[in-house]
Structure formats: structure tokens, C-alpha cells
Amino acid sequence: MSSLNLDDFSDLIERPDGGVRRDAEARRERQIVPPGSLGRLDDLGEWLAAAQSAVPVRPIERPRVILFAGDHGIAELGVSAHPAGTAVELVREVLDGGRPVSVLARRLGVPVRVVDMALDCDPQTLPEDVVRHRVRRGSGRIDVEDALTVEEAEAAFRAGMAVADEEADSGTDLVVLGDVSVGGTTAAGVLIAALCGTDASVVTGRGGQAIDDLAWMRKCAAIRDALRRARPVLGEQLQLLATVGGADLAAITGFLLQSAVRKLPVVLDGVVVAACALVGQRIAFRAPDWWLAGQSSGEPGQGKALDRMALEPLLDHGVTVGEAAGALLALPLVQAAAALAAELPERPQEPAAVDEEPEKEAPARQELEKEELEQEEPEKEEH
């Protein structure tokens, strides 16, 4: 049995500061540009102020891309455009600067951290800081066996929590979260279908490399078969991650929840991260208040998950490559919202209106008082 009590997260996670958000809204109403004229940037600035408990909001100065990596046994069925067990090649390309996320991160000046949770390779072939949290070599084939043991799922979950603590302690002020996996979107589809109570075909997308129709049918069948194994453990989220998730998905879930505990805002990328966020919402219903949906990838499973969490994507560019590339495109938007909220000047205070009414009434009042005195004088003489 697991020693990890997931119910603790419901007590530990608070909502972003509502009082500070109201102060941010009041400040926004005083700024020179009318409220609402900046569209969603207004909401973003106020959300950031509440997350930081600061008015005016502080600029986003130390963002970071975090990528959890792993191979999934289900890829053996040909459900991905990449061959099974080749996620390590993608990781090396990220580290060498040749992937889309690497190019965008360089351009934006954002460091990228890769965390190996279950790559199917010799750990000695990768840097120590990449592999030190690894739980196992590859995750199981979820249509016929568990992805992980419960003990491995707990270890992966705790590793994600540890990474969140490391980032919060180092001063990271915003995380752009993604994955590097082969077969990960299939596991994500199973989690989303199970938690949303829908069929496999509703959540089965084409993945990052746009698989053909035959591969899509194999993927749909794999999700359907894994769903049968997922439904009996829906009430136990750690068991669910062990049964049909994977080490990288369990770590992402732990990272998301601990980030909410540490009040560290997170921008979500694609369907894999959305699936983990959905599991996280089941564990702690306040946790999604700390997350932003960076982009809509067009994957049907991601759309279902974001709808369930009431998260509206910032961008709709259909980036399906994964590795947080789509979410990273939203980072300048978040930084712009913070800058506008903090730096737009407030309107000058208008001088208080002078009440001229007493001056207008003064002559009439004086005339009335004179008449009253004239009436009183004869009365005094009679006495």
C-alpha cells in the first residue's frame, strides 16, 4: 500500500488571494486605458496579481520550461509516428538545441529542464541531472498490463513533487510544463476518457506527428482496451496512474499539485499535461486555479480535459509537437499582461466638485431673514 495521502492536497492547496485580486481590479479601473479594452490581458494581469499576492503585479523574470520524459510500452502497437522506445532521441535533440522548444526557449531566453522518469535507455548515456529522478526503464503496455507498480507510481509522483519544490526554492516564478514521450498521448487519452466517462473514439487524436488512419484505429483500440482496465480503479488516483498512466504522467501530476501548494503558477501544454491536470483536479479541486492552459493543440482529448477543468486556452495555434512548444508561445502574452498591469499609469485624480448651491441660495435666505426681523420688531414694541 502507498504511504502517500493524496487527500492532504485538498487541505494544503489554497485559492489565489481573492482580496488581492479585488485590489488589482480596482487598480485596473483607475488606469488610463478603460477596463476591458485590453481583452483577456486584463484577466491575466489580475490572475497573476492574485497568484503572487502582489499589487501591482511583479514582472515574470524567471520562467522555466520543465519537460518530463518517458517511453510507454503501448507504443509497441504502432500507435505513434515514432518507433517504440525512441523518446531518448527526442530528449537528446532537446538537450542539443535542435527541437522546436529549444529554438523558442533560446529566442525567449528561457532555460529548459528535462527530467527523465522512464526513458527506455541506459541512464549513463544522459547527464546526471536529467536521469537522477528516474523510476524505471519504460512503462508497461497498458492495454494488457499495469504501467507501473503502485510503489513506482508513488516514487514518480514524489519525484514530481520534489522537482516542484526545487523550482520554487530556486526562485522560478512561472513554469511552462510539457512532456517528451513516445506513446504518452495514448496513455493520456485513456485517463481523459476514464475521468470524463466517454468512449475511446471521442478522445483519440493523431498525436504529435499526425499518424495515418490505420495507426489511429490501432490507437483507438488500444485506448478502448486500456479503458476496461482503468474503470475499476477510478476512485483511486494513484492506482489509476499506476494502471494506465506511466512514470512521466505520475510525475507531472505530482509536480502540478505541489506547484499549487507552493503557489507557483504553471502554463499547461498539450494533451499529456492536460490529462495529468485532470487527475490533479480529482485529487484537489482548487488546484486548477493555479494553472493556465497555454494553447489548444486541436487534440480532442485535450479539449475534453480543459472543458472539464473550465480552463480556456490562451492561444489556438494547433501545435501538436508536444515538448511545451505550444505553451511556450503563450509566455510572451503572460509577460505582457504582467507588464501592462504593473506599468500603465493611473488616471490623475479629478478635483472634488465645488458645491455652488449654498452661494445661489444665500441672497434669498438673507432676504427671508430680513423680513422675519421686520415682523418681530413691532411685536417687541407692543410689549
Image (cartoon, rainbow, N blue to C red):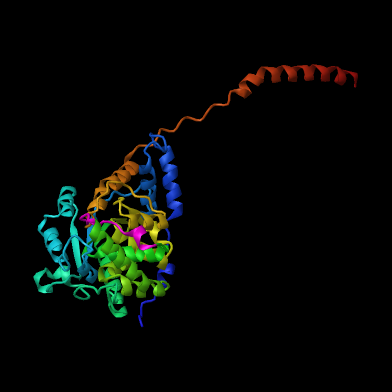
Q: Would residue 247 be counted in the magenta stretch?
A: no
Report whether 278 appears left or right of 352.
left
Residue situated in front as seen by the camera: 130 or 13:
130
Residue 16 to residue 253: above or below = above
x then y, percent, for residue 244? 31, 71
Q: Residue at x 30, y 70 (%)?
A: 245
Quarter occupied by the C terminus: top right
- Please tell me whether the stretch drawn in magenta is mainly helix, strand or loop: loop
x then y, percent, for residue 187? 29, 66
- Identity of the residue furthest to the right in this view: 382
Residue 60 to residue 185: above or below = above
Whether residue 13 is visible: no
Residue 187 to residue 367: above or below = below
Quarter occupied by the N terminus: bottom left
Q: Quadrant of residue 195?
A: bottom left
Q: What are the residue bounds of the magenta stretch?
A: 199-212
- Identity of the residue furthest to the bottom in this view: 1
